[in-house]
Image (cartoon, rainbow, N blue to C red):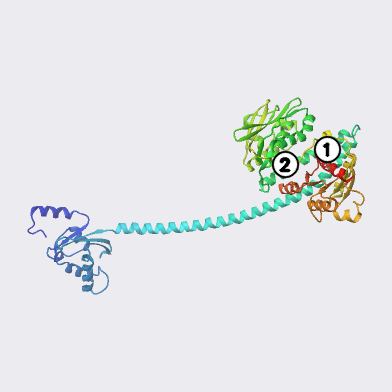
């Protein structure tokens, strides 16, 4: 292999012998020109086949006869292998050596027709690729297992969520029914107590009657708070924004809380304004009620509570400011927690500490902003931000009358319909104490059967919503159809859902929520009496 080579060629041959790949060069007649040691070693060729001038065909026949190229006719396999190496300018092929090694062959045709063959021992690479493939298969298996497990978990979570939704729905329905059943006897108790208070004035029983009324009020507040929280958390309470006049909102607060402020010896000052906001009237009213109620309850006698509205850019800021006990910054989060009350506040007023928790939930449900600024011993400021609505007419609110100025006899004919005899008895006793001529019925059938309206025309109707055979709204419509379309009426109900209130207001029917508060009842009757007066004049 070294004969007649120039010195430069001998140096090149020496260098090629140290290359880790097997290399062989063939001339245009496919006879061996030169090969390196690695070529001869990897193919395990006899010395005679590594001499220059050896035909490529002889080498191929040796390998096929040895079985390197697989089973078959050696001559046919040899020619097929040579064609594979020479059919293209460059080729790449792979096969196993006689020793079981994985070899990768590269062939290139030279410009003069010759051929260069180089090959590598890629056994380690193949082994690594096989291991990687096994790892990938294992990984794919694990991914499939994890995916199946995750799918199962998601399915179980979906089932659990569906069960939770169903349970939540059932709870909401139960609470709606339970609230009615629970508030019914409480409503009767409140009415009986109101009658007792009226009759016990200037007697030894006045203080006892007042204590009973205060206890019933506390029970009502707790039940109302718990029901509100349940409705909010279950999603049953859906805000319905509409244009609301802040004048009406603040006037209602003044009507409702002026007596409580006087009872506590607190000065309540409400600054009215003629602006309009876009909000849910009932829910915003509930927020302000809680804030004003808390401000009065936790302000010592001689203190002040201020309620007012200021414009802040595109929003209005409704402030409830008091000079009460206040609290430090570390207690800000605590005051909004359920059943959480500060020690000093617990000593000043009864309650479960649910008012501000309800406020926070309502603010979140309506996507509003509530700010708190308080200093211990100096008072607090709660600020509710409401979207300002320019150039819009507020939705008409149900007129409120200040009940305290109307403590005399009404001299009205009032029809009361409720499916609870105790409530009718209590309502009749209270209304008669106010100078009213009252007739009661458990249903429309009783009215018709006993002829309660023969020769007796009511000035107004107080109607329960949940009657045994129909709804109170339909019953009012029946009475109006038979007695006259302008018959003033109020729906008295334990159902506090916005849907019922909206249905009633659409029909021009006032709403009084159970348990009935005497002041609210007086205010409603006064408003309805004003509607009844023109009708009475027309009938004269």
Instruction: Give neighbour class at mark 1: few <14, some 14-19, many 20+ (Cα, 10 Å).
Output: many
Dot 2: element: loop
Dot 1: element: helix
Mark 2–mark 1 distance (CA, rounded to whole Å): 33 Å
- The residue sitting at the bottom extreme is 73
Which of the two marks, 2 or 1, is nearer to us in this view? 2
Query: Which sits in the foreground, 142 or 187?
Result: 187
Q: Is residue 299 above or below residue 82?
A: above
- What residue is at 59 percent from the left and 33 percent from the top? 313
Residue 213, labelled with which disc?
1
**Residue 203 in which image quadrant:** top right
Query: Which sits in the foreground, 325 or 188?
Result: 188
Quadrant containing the N terminus in the rendered view:
bottom left
Instruction: Give neighbour class at mark 2: few <14, some 14-19, many 20+ (Cα, 10 Å).
Output: few
Q: Is residue 339 visible?
A: no
Q: Is residue 349 above or below residue 420?
A: above
* Residue 316 in the image, given as x and y percentages of width and height: 64, 34
Q: Is residue 36 above or below residue 337?
A: below
Query: Which sits in the foreground, 102 or 370?
Result: 370
Q: Is residue 146 left or right of residue 13?
A: right
Counting the numbered discs, the total is 2
Point out the tag, 2 or 1, that comes first from the N-terminus.
Answer: 1
* Residue 251 in the image, given as x and y percentages of width and height: 74, 35
Q: Is residue 482 visible?
A: yes
* Residue 484 in the image, given as x and y percentages of width and height: 84, 50
Residue 396, labelled with which disc?
2
- What residue is at 7 percent from the left and 58 percent from the top? 4
* Residue 6 in the image, given as x and y percentages of width and height: 8, 55
């Amino acid at each position: 292999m070294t004969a007649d080579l120039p010195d430069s060629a001998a140096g090149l041959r020496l260098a090629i012998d140290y290359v880790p790949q097997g290399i062989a060069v063939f001339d245009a007649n496919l006879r061996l020109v030169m090969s390196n040691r690695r070529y001869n070693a990897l193919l395990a060729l006899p010395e005679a086949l590594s001499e220059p001038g050896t035909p490529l065909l002889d080498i191929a026949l040796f390998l096929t006869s040895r079985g390197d190229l697989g089973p078959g006719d050696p001559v046919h396999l040899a020619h097929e292998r040579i064609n594979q190496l020479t059919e293209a300018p460059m080729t790449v092929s792979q096969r196993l050596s006689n020793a079981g090694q994985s070899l990768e062959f590269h062939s290139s045709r030279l410009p003069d027709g010759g051929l260069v063959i180089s090959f590598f021992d890629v056994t380690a690479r193949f082994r690594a690729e096989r291991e990687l493939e096994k790892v990938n298969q294992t990984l794919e298996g694990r991914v499939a297992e994890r995916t199946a497990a995750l799918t199962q978990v998601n399915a179980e979570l979906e089932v659990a969520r569906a069960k939770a939704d169903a349970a939540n729905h059932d709870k909401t329905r139960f609470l709606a029914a339970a609230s009615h059943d629970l508030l019914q006897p409480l409503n009767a108790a409140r009415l009986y107590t109101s009658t007792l208070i009226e009759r016990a004035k200037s007697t030894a029983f006045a203080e006892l009657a007042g204590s009973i009324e205060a206890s019933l009020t506390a029970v009502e507040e707790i039940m109302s708070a718990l029901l509100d929280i349940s409705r909010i958390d279950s999603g049953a309470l859906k805000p319905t924004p509409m244009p609301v006049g802040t004048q009406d909102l603040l006037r209602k607060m003044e009507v409702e809380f002026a007596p409580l402020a006087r009872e506590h010896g607190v000065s309540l000052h409400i600054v009215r304004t003629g602006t309009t906001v876009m909000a849910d009237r009932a829910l915003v009213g509930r927020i302000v009620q809680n804030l004003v109620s808390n401000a009065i309850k936790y302000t010592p006698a001689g203190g002040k509570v201020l309620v007012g509205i200021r414009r802040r850019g595109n929003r209005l800021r409704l402030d409830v400011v008091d000079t009460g006990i206040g609290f430090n910054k570390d207690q800000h989060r605590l005051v909004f927690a359920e059943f959480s009350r500060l020690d000093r506040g617990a000593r000043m007023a009864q309650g479960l500490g649910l008012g501000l928790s309800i406020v926070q939930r309502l603010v979140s449900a309506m996507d509003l902003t509530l700010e708190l600024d308080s200093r211990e011993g100096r008072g607090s400021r709660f600020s509710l931000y409401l979207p300002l609505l320019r150039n819009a007419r507020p939705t008409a609110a149900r007129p409120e009358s200040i009940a305290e100025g109307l403590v005399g006899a009404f001299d009205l004919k009032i029809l009361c319909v409720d499916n609870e005899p105790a409530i009718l008895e209590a309502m009749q006793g209270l209304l008669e104490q106010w100078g009213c001529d009252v007739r009661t019925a458990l249903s429309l059938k009783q009215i018709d059967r006993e002829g309660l309206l023969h020769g007796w025309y009511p000035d107004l109707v107080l109607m329960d919503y949940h009657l045994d055979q129909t709804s109170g709204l339909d019953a009012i419509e029946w009475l109006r159809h038979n007695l006259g379309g302008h018959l003033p009426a109020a729906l008295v109900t334990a159902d506090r859902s916005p849907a019922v209130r909206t249905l009633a207001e659409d029909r021009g029917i006032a709403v009084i929520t159970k348990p009935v508060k005497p002041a609210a009842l007086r205010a409603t009757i006064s408003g309805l009496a004003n509607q009844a007066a023109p009708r009475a004049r027309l009938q004269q």
